[in-house]
Amino acid sequence: MPDPRRRVPRTDDVLADPALAEPLARLGRAEVKRTVSAVQQRVRAGELDPDGTVDAVLLELPRVPVALVRVLNATGVLLHTNLGRAALSPAAVSALALAAGATDVELDLVTGARGRRGRGAMAALAAAVPGAGDVHVVNNGAAALVLAATALAGAGREVVIARGEMVEIGDGFRLPDLLESTGARLREVGTTNRVTREDYARAVGPATGFVLKVHPSNFVVQGFTSSVGPGELTGLGVPVVCDIGSGLLAPHPRLPDEPDAASTLAAGADLVTCSGDKLLGGPQAGLLLGDAEIVHRLRRHPLARALRVDKLTLAALEATVRGPATPTARGLATSATELRARATALADALTAAGVDARAVPSAATVGGGGAPGVELDSAAVSVAAGMATALRTGHPAVLGRVEQGRCLLDLLAVDPADDAELLEAVRRAASR
Ligand SMILES: *Cc1c(COP(=O)(O)O)cnc(C)c1O
C-alpha cells in the first residue's frame, strides 16, 4: 500500500471540488485556502486519509470569515463584559443587516435633500423618554461623558463631583482620569461616604462648568452614608449632569435601586448619560438625553464628529428601543420556576445520555457594572468541574461558572431557543 503522505491532494484540485463552490463564494478564496492547507498538513502527517480531504475541509470551515467564536453564556452574568455585554434582539440583528446596505440614514427621501443623521434612533429614544427635550448618541458611555465634559466644562473649568462618586469602571479605567483628559478640573466635594447639598453649593462658583453625579454602578457603600439626589442640586445655577451608567430608560421592578433616565430627568437632572449595551440591551453606544439647548450644544461641538456612531449602531439601537423585549429584558423577566424547568429537562436529557448532570438552584447577577449586590434567582445544570475546559473550547463555546467543585451552567442568560444547542455542546464535551 502506498504511503498516504505521498498522495496529498493538490490545493487547486481541492479548491476545484464542486462541494467547495458555495463555501468559496461565502468565505472567499484566501479563507478556504487556509483551511485546505491545515487539512493537507494532517494528511501529510498521516492523521487523515487523502480521500477524506474535502469532507474534512467542509467540516472545519467557519460559517463566517471571522475568528470570533459563538459563546453560549451560561455564566449567570446577564451582561458579561468579556462576552460583549448585551446580546442583541433578533429585531436589532435584522436592523443591522438592513443598515449594511445603502439606506436613508442621512437623507430625506421625500425632498431628496440631506436629512438629520440617525433621526429614527433619536425619535425612538425621545418617544421612550418623553421628559427628554432632545437626544444625542455617541460611541459609548465614556464618550458621552467626554463630550459633556469637553463641551460644558473643558479647558480650565470645573466639574463638581462627590468624592464617593470618583469611580473606576473596570480594567483600570477611572472616570476622574477620563474627565481630566478633557482639560476640565475636578472639584471634589464631600467625603468617601457622605456628601450634602451644602458641600456642592459651597463648591459651585464662576469656574464651574457643571455638577456631575455618577451612579456607583459596580459597588455599594453601606453604613453611615448620605448622598444628594439630582433634585436637590437644581437651583445652583449650573447644569446637573447624571451618569446613570446602565441605560434603563424607565424604572425596572426587579432593580429598584438602579437609576433610570426618565426618573432622573423628572427629578431635575439637565442631562443624563448612559450606555447602550448594558440594561438597555442594545449595541455599544453612549446616550445623552435632556435639556434641548444643552444637547444641541453637544451635537454641534467639533468633538461630536469624532465620537459619532456608525449606521449599524443607529439601526440596532432604534430596533432595540422600538422593537420587542431584548434578550436582556427577557433574562431579567424570567422566573426561577421557568429556569428550574429548563434546567431539569436539560439535566434529565444529559443523564439519559450518560453524562453526570443535575439541576440545581443558582444565583445570577446583572453584571456589566450594573445592579451591584442584586442576586437574581436562577437555575443551573451542574456538571463535573473537569468539563469546564472542554466546554469552553468547543464550538459553540459554553462558558459556565466553576463553584464548589462543580461547573454550573446557569440558564438565566441563555436564550431558551439555544437549549438544544447547549445540550448538544455538553454532550460533545463529555465525549471528548
Ligand atoms: C459602564 C459605565 C460607564 C462607561 O460606559 P461605557 O459604555 O462602558 O463606556 C460610565 N459610567 C458608569 C456609571 C458606568 O456604569
Image (spheres, rainbow, N blue to C red):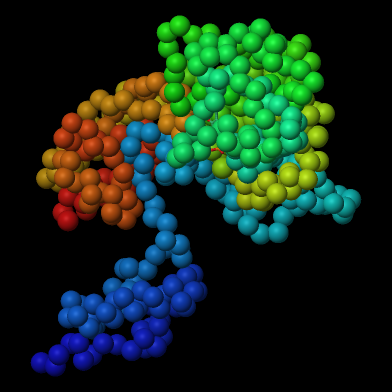
Foreground: 41 or 1? 41
Above or below, 5 against 299 in this view is below
Q: Is residue 424 above or below residue 52?
A: above
Residue 318 location, quadrant: top right
* Residue 376 relative to residue 389: left or right: right
* Residue depicted at 31% across the width and 44% down the height: 399
* Residue that appears at 40% across and 78% down: 33
Q: Quadrant of residue 203?
A: top right
- Image coordinates for residue 98, horizontal then vertical, percent: 63, 53
* Towards the viewer: 175 or 398: 175
Q: Is residue 91 visible?
A: no
Left or right for 197, reference 410:
right
Give the image location of residue 240, x and y in percent. 70, 20
If the image is split into quadrants, where does the C terminus sit? bottom left
Figure label count: 0
Ligand 1 rendered quadrant: top right
Observer able to see residue 15 = yes
Q: Is residue 415 left or right of residue 112?
A: left
Q: Nearer the viewer, residue 188 or 66?
A: 188
- From the image, which quarter does the N terminus lie in? bottom left
Would you say 258 lies left or right of 309 here?
Answer: left
Q: Position of residue 283 (x, y in %)?
A: 56, 42
- Where's residue 147, x and y in %? 70, 38
Name the residue at 74% across, 23% down.
208
**Residue at left offset 46%, top offset 27%:** 218
